[in-house]
Image: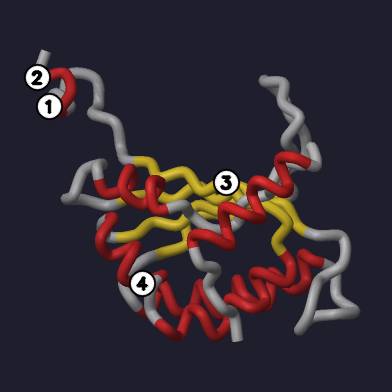
Amino acid sequence: MIRSLSAATFITLTVALLAAGGAMAQIAPEPEQIEELLEGPAEGPVVMVNLLRFKKEADAPDEGLTGEEAYGRYGAQMVQWVTSQGARLIWSGRVDSMVIGDTDEYFHAIALMEYPSRAEFLRIIGDPRVAEFSVHRTAGLDMQWLIASTTMAEPGGPQSAEESND
């Protein structure tokens, strides 16, 4: 069973890691990040860009596996769940090289998942069934960037909300 941390425990751990000079690898959203997600368009699909970095060796309950293998156990169940709820896997693959850009961060894989809306994304991932197989995600995932994206207006098409408010 995964227990959620209290705010005080989370702050204490964060301060301790920062004081030790270490950066905290994030694999779960902060409340402010969920608020920001909900500030985006309420209607229409959202594509979640998953940038994934795996542990070399998985933690419990997947000892003996690589992080990627453990995450694969989660991914197989998660894709089955989200597709049964009206979402879809658009694409997934390995990161081969960095062609443009310079960063200290690196990722092993990318996955694009489309959800009917931001609210549906939160409903789907918040279902208790997801927590059951997320133990494999936690066991195998070192770090994740999750980027919410929406389709841009086509050239010559309707204006975006920001453009119409200018």
Q: Position of residue 15 (x, y in %)?
A: 65, 46
Q: Place residue 101 in its image quadrant.
A: top right
| Residue that appears at 9% across and 19% down | 165
User: Label 1, on which residue?
Assistant: 158
Question: Where does the C terminus fall, quadrant-wise?
Answer: top left
Please rate how many residues cluster around mark 1, counting C-alpha atoms within 10 Å: few if below 14, some from 14 to 19, many from 20: few
Compute the Cα span from label 3 to label 4: 19 Å
Local SS, label 3:
strand
114 above or below 81?
Answer: above
User: Circle 2 is placed at which residue position?
Assistant: 165
Query: Which amino acid, by three-letter code, is at mark 3?
Result: Trp
Q: Which residue is mark 3?
A: 145
Q: Position of residue 112 (x, y in %)?
A: 50, 52
Label tally: 4
Q: Are marks 3 and 2 in contact (CB under 8 Å)?
A: no
Label 3 to label 1: alpha-carbon separation: 30 Å
- Which of label 2 and label 1 is nearer to you? 2
Left or right of 41, for residue 34: right
Seen in the picture, residue 83 relative to 90 is either above or below; the reply is below
Q: Is residue 56 left or right of residue 108?
A: right
Is the Cβ of the residue at disc 4 closer than 8 Å to that at disc 2? Answer: no
Residue type at mark 1 is Pro
Amino acid of disc 2 = Asn
Say which of 79 and 137 sits in front.
Answer: 137
The answer to which quarter of the image holds residue 73 is bottom right
